[in-house]
Image (cartoon, helix red, strand yellow):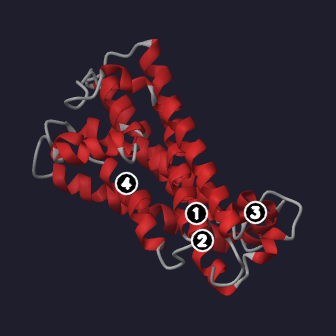
Amino acid sequence: MVAAMWIRSTLTYRASFALTLLSNLVVTFFDFVVILLMFGQVRALGGFSFPEVAFLYGTTATSFGLADLVMGSLPRMGKRVRDGSFDTFLLRPAPVLAQVAADRFGLRRLGRVTQGLIVLIWSLVLLTQSSLVAWTPLKLLLVPVMLASGAVIFGAVMVIGASVLFWAQDAAEVTNSFTYGGNNLLQFPPTVFAQDLVRGVVYVVPLAFVNWLPALYVLGRPAPEGVPEGAAFASPLVAGVCCAVAGLAWRTGLRAYRSTGS
């Protein structure tokens, strides 16, 4: 109901909404322009061709866009804890996390999702035309599973980051480094990064399960050194574990809340 209220408010000025949506799409597209410029100078990046890198970009951009659409209001938690306006959410007979996520719901964020889907569909066409992927029913099924699981993983990381803001109200930028920063990281092949960093996003903050590991299976490439091949199919399980950790972190932060400045 809260989200619907903000959507109705946004659509009151349809021309303004359309321009904002378009500008959001164009601004996020500049991330992909960087990749286009790179491939204007090279034929491969870390051993990956342009269609393969575009596939990595499209999957993570779509997953992150979906998570940002639903959970994009969470970084405001620090300000609400600091000024005491978070108290209003505690007075309503509705789940607090749902209220915070729906507050100031930004329908304009659909621009990010749309841009990611456009690149993803384009990459799938290029991969098929160039015969870089031998499509099987399992690989076809893994693509939507990857997108859904990736959105849940990103959303869980956002909730964990918002939970930290109960104690560190000015740490929103730190938590954004794992979400926005993770999205930027996953747009490029794991082969261009140090192995320690790759292991970190597999075993510490499991962002590699958003797209790297399942995408490598789809592209017919080996998993990073030390990572079992079966990890490509573990994204739904990892997403469930991340949700459990996020739920625990949120409840812990909520119990620690003592109104303004806590």
The residue indicated by pointer 1 is 163
The residue indicated by pointer 3 is 99
Q: Secondary structure at mark 1?
A: helix
Horizontal and vertical percent position of residue 250: 63, 57
Q: Secondary structure at mark 2?
A: loop
Q: Secondary structure at mark 3?
A: helix
Question: What distance separates the C-alpha of mark 2 from that of mark 1?
Answer: 6 Å
Horizontal and vertical percent position of residue 32: 32, 55
Horizontal and vertical percent position of residue 136: 41, 13
Q: Which mark is residue 232?
A: none
The answer to which of marks 3 and 1 sits earlier in the sequence is 3
* Identity, as a three-letter code, of the amino acid under mark 3: Gln
Q: Are marks 2 and 4 in contact (CB under 8 Å)?
A: no
Residue at (23% x, 41% y) in the render: 190
* Identity, as a three-letter code, of the amino acid under mark 4: Gly
Extreme residue in the top direction: 136
Q: Residues within 10 Å of mark 4 (few under 14, many from 20)?
A: some
Q: Which mark is residue 182?
A: 4
Q: Residues within 10 Å of mark 1 (few under 14, many from 20)?
A: many
Q: Visible in this render: residue 110?
A: no
Disc number lying in front (3 or 1): 1
The residue indicated by pointer 2 is 166
Please tell me which residue lies in front, 55 or 248.
248
Question: What distance separates the C-alpha of mark 3 from that of mark 1?
Answer: 14 Å
State the quadrant of the N terminus.
bottom right
Disc number lying in front (2 or 4): 2
Residue at (44% x, 58% y) in the render: 179
Q: Visible in this render: residue 65?
A: yes
Q: Residues within 10 Å of mark 2 (few under 14, many from 20)?
A: many
Residue at (63% x, 64% y) in the render: 253
As drawn, is 209 to the left or to the right of 157? Answer: left
